[in-house]
Image (spheres, rainbow, N blue to C red):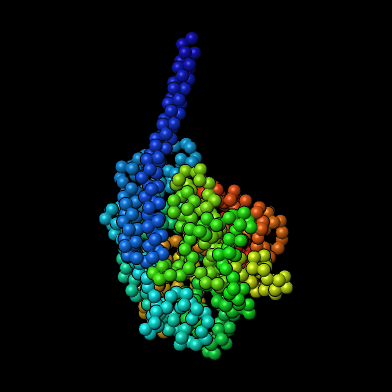
Amino acid sequence: MKRVYFLAGILLAGIVVFSGCKKKEKDMNKELQEFITQYEGKVIPLFKEASLASWNAEITGKEEDFNKAAELGIKINTIFTNKEDFKKLKEFKESGKVTDSLLLRQLDDLYNSYLSSQADPKKLEEIIREESKVSQKYNTYRAKIGNKEYSDNEIEDILKNSTNSDSLKAAWEASKQIGALVAADVIKLAKLRNEIAKSIGFSNYHEMSLKLGDQDPQEINKIFDELDSLTKDAFATLKGEMDDYFAKRYGIKKEELRPWHYQNRFFQEAPKIYSVNFDTYYANQNLETLTAKYFNGIGLPVEAIMKASDLYEKEGKSQHAFCTHIDGQGDVRILCNIKPNEYWMNTMLHEFGHGVYDKYLDFNLPYSLRNAAHTFTTEAIAMMFGRMATNGQWLKDNVGIKEEEKQKIAEIGFKSLQLQQLTFSRWSQVMYRFEKGMYENPDQDLNKLWWDLVEKYQMLKRPEGRNSADWASKNHIATSPCYYHNYLLGELLASQLHNYIVTNIIKSDDFLNQSYSNNKEVGAYLKTKVFEPGSKYQWNTMIEKATGEKLTAKYYAKQFVSSLKK
């Protein structure tokens, strides 16, 4: 009998301990939810106010608007610098007692957000003020040729259309003048960001950005090395075609070609070397109407986004393009500076791709999960739609060109897209490796680093005797640091999604002549499998659920590299 009671005692003790653990788990879940509720009560209204202030600053260029946005950014940052809150989050994370999957996702997001702010508050404030100051410089800067000012659009028009090497060189050099004006500011920002990163245990800001963004730096390096190997020879072939074309266009020898001869300030866009000028198809079109018609046709209406957006040039306004989600409740807005041409058609489709991703999130998700699974997954959607601007089938379905015209331009449309993809892929190598190098050593000769990378990956010749901060003329390096690699990851996913849609939804083996137009099943698939999950799942889990595979480069290679080997 004693033995029986002894065993029963052990069993009873086990039940008591087990029940106690269960109670503790429930308490930990409850405590974390209470923490999140308090956090949201502080953050949600501030984020909305800050987003509105930033939006106003971008469309007015006014110093007082930038100052207001900066002040609100500082207020938000003070929430994340709270040491006691971070201590609680660390306890939640290390306890192993948070069992609810949605709470665990929120915990990871909050922990990383707080961790990046566990540094000297004064330095964090200084970074915000410096970022605001340099953003204003970029936004209000206008290139000068002689005594005349030129917008970015006007500079691009000269680079694209002029056949005079002197005019091209003058326009290109004018576009780089901003670099010298902001270089010291950008280096200062890089060093401040590094100080923050080192203070919380990272070797530099680049490493911190990737790791806190749920990316393994070694894995990203591996992908970029693989893509370099994958695209180098194919790009060299196309670069040879470009050089032949431009030497003839400008009446110079191939060895005389310089960066200003490639129709773009950074050679990040594919030059127009094929016989079809896609600008002509959009010259008399209303890009707003085309964009709304297309997205409505696939079951993703955009009227509310269009109404809230600011789409045309104005003095002081940012000359770039972006999408912003103001409140996490569907107030989605887009800034553009549209002209009736192929570039801005691509940009409208791209930005409204971001827009529908945000607009059709599941707003029943917790606030911190109402985001894309990763920044590059929303880029993928934007890129997938942006690619349509030179797609013959899309032009037939939406602009109304005839079948004969579509047949005539379909191959060239694809070649234009292929050229764009490989041109952009090589440019992304420069951006990724420059930022990585800059944050590893911001005191090195950054001008030399920049041109070494440009020569290696873009195969451009540096101008003789030039020693200017051309790298700093690219505003992303200052205002969207350590982000650019996500564009290229987005291109990989765009090809993977396109392959899935054509194979499984459209059920076709024609991967070229597809626009998805008026196919609401495509919109339903994207809403259900990509948009609505938000960041409920880790990004590769979402991709696998949506396509049946984790992220892979094979569909990008299939689409844009393999055809050059045939």
Q: Along the horizontal axis of the image, is 387 left or right of 407? A: left
Q: Is residue 76 visible?
A: yes
Hey, which quadrant is residue 503 in on the image?
bottom right
- 239 on left or right of 12: right
Report the front residue among 397 and 217.
397
Q: Residue at x 61, y 67 (%)?
A: 560
Q: How many marks?
A: 0
x then y, percent, for residue 333: 48, 58
Nearer to the camera, 486 or 388: 388
* Residue at (37, 70) in percent of width and height: 140
**Residue 47, percent across and down?**
39, 51
Q: Residue furthest front?
A: 307
Q: Residue at x 63, y 79 (%)?
A: 275
User: Which of 350 and 186 lies nearest the eye of the viewer?
Assistant: 350
Q: Percent position (x, y) of residue 72?
A: 33, 54
Residue 9, compared with residue 256, is above or below; it is: above
- In terms of image quadrants, where is residue 13? top left
Res 496 visible = no
Q: Residue at (64%, 65%) from the top-left corner? A: 398
Quadrant, the C terminus: bottom right
Instruction: Farthest residue to the left: give it.
Output: 122
372 w.r.t. 5: above or below: below
